[in-house]
Amino acid sequence: MTQNLFQRVIIIVLAAGLLIYPLILPGAFFRDIGVTFLLVAISASAWNIVGGYAGQVSVGHSMFYGLGAYTPVLFYTLWGWPPLAGIPFGILLSIGLALVIGTPTFRLTGHYFSMATIAVAELIRIFTGTWDLVGAAIGLQGPATARGWWDLTFRGELPYYYIFLGVLVVLLVTTAAIERRRFGFYLRAIKASERAARSLGVPVRQTKIKALALSAAFTSIAGSLYVVKTGFIDPDSGFGILISVQMVIVAALGGAGTLFGPLVGALILVPLQTATNSWFGGGGTGLTYILYGGIIVLIARFEPGGLFEMWQRVAPKFWNRAHAA
Amino acid sequence: MVVVQVMVGGLLLGAIYALFSSGLTLIWGMMNFINFAHGEFVMLGMYVALLVVTWLGGGPAVFGIAAAFALFVLGVGIYMSLIREVIRGPMLAQILSTFGLALLLRYTAFFIFSANFVSLPKTSLSGTIMIGGLFLPIAQLVAGIVAIVLTISLHLLLTRTTAGSKLLAVAEDRAAAMLMGIRPDRMQALAWGLSAGAAGIAGALMATAYPWSPSVGETFGLIAFVVVALGGFGSVLGSLYAGLIIGLIQAASAFWLGAIYKDIVVYALFVALLWFRPQGLMGKA
């Protein structure tokens, strides 16, 4: 068994595990963790397209997440539309926003781009909190009881789990396809050196905007999934800076710019978060972020490539030693 | 008269913005690096002031210097243990490092001090005075004036002293500075100390006049971005003007539009700035 085959086996085992997870652990507690894991993995993978592959570190992705979360419930509140019908509009709005903010902010690079995205997301968050149409600081509520399946309001966690899993698979397949295409090479070239990429004829601006739009579309879907599951949205849970920060942390912990990095990050952070919350009760939220902060600092200091890169560095040595013996 | 009163209040607060923002701009100018934890340094300065007052019971001069010193040490420590390494790493690591630090400091403060708003007990600066028909809290007046003096001192330190010339030399060309016998590492550690120290004393000054909670760091961090973007990255004098302008704009929008809009106006200005003039008002293109 070669190392490559070994990795493929791991992936198949993980995929099978995800598929049957809610059936072997049927308790509501475990299903809730499973759904949360999928949601976190989806948003981090969506961020990964522009933040990981293209190396444009957005810390304001909550703007797309919030748009995706607000649009379906807003249309429901205003005109009684089922959330399913509102989701595509959330995606369109997010892509529109990506185009609008991408054009000027992509002239900025590095830290400057991160600052700009934070400011835009904060601006939208505060503005949402003062706008009565979208419920101001109180927020909006989705349908309480389902009028049909298209309301995406289910009693148990199981339907959500498989819907989320389906979205994650679509996102990963899309990312894997990008990885192999010219577009994926463009992204990595831009990450390595924008100037060099441009000199080799990569359409830098255009590529970055495309990546941001694609990333925004999937982030918006993640927001929509969040709102159909919880049935409720307010400015902080939609546009809050911690939403954006979580995407960055999860992707960076696993390995930003790798296909499965965000999954690995979510696999570690979600159970950790659940554990600190249940051990320390309500005060645990603060503790979770202390832990998050500590983990990011350590990752930045010692393993900037994330756990996935560490594994790729360590595993071959380990493998060779096992074979030599 | 009310308008003048509001504007003076805005200018005095703006002076403190200018002081802590000059710390952020110093680091940016030195090493093209944005410290996302800078607002948290201000917040820590406030709590250092509170602890010194409640435990040791010093006056404003004592806790101001204590906050500056404590944050100076913290800044140097953070540079030595974290920043010096990540600056050589990828962009993502650089951004993550201070972001993680911000989360760590903010939520540790929540954990220790709780989310409640606190303010300093009565100090010698309590009370108000009347100048030319304006009622001014003494604490605000003193804090604002001291902040302006300190910001100008920092500017003079950078432009008129040997240490300042060394700092600027390292910022200009690290390798050339090294050939001149300057140790870039030491200078950058000094810059981090000065930057955090400025934030710390700004926090202590602000603590004399305004109540706060651990979450203020986030707001101050964003305000520092806006001030630096307006004043031009790397320009201490620019951040002095920009801080005063931002203070004025905040006061004016709170007065005419309502208190909740004061941050919206400031952030909108920031976004507009990044759009139309990314190098800042005073910055070089």
Image (cartoon, coloured by chain):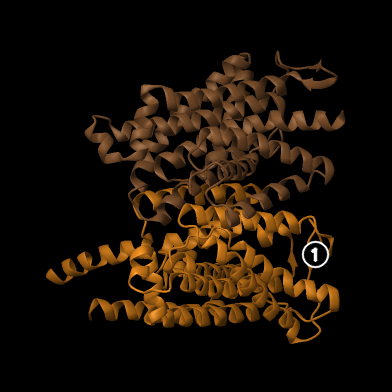
Chain colours: A orange, B brown
Q: On the rendered image, what quadrant is the C terminus of chain A found in? A: bottom left
Give the image quarter of residue A179: bottom left
- Residue type beneath disc 1: Val
Q: Secondary structure at mark 1?
A: helix
Give the image quarter of residue B170: top left
Q: On the rendered image, what quadrant is the N terminus of chain A found in? A: bottom left
Q: Position of residue A269 (x, y in %)?
A: 50, 60
Q: Is residue B120 left or right of residue B165?
A: right
A20 vs B94: above or below:
below
Q: Nearer the viewer, residue B208 or B159?
A: B159
Give the image quarter of residue B56: top right
B82 vs B4: above or below:
below
Give the residue pinned by disc 1. A134
| Chain for disc number 1 | A
Q: Position of residue A52 (x, y in %)?
A: 44, 66
Q: Is residue B119 left or right of residue A187?
A: right
Identity of the residue drawn at 43% across and 34% down:
B192
Give the residue at the far left of this rendering. Answer: A324
The answer, for residue A230, to whether it is visible in the render is no
Identity of the residue drawn at 31% across and 35% down:
B185
Total residue callouts: 1
A230 vs B159: above or below:
below
Q: Position of residue A248 (x, y in %)?
A: 50, 60
Identity of the residue drawn at 55% across and 41% down:
B282
Q: Position of residue B48 (x, y in %)?
A: 57, 26
Q: Nearer the viewer, residue A92 or B270?
A: B270
Q: Nearer the viewer, residue A52 or B15?
A: B15
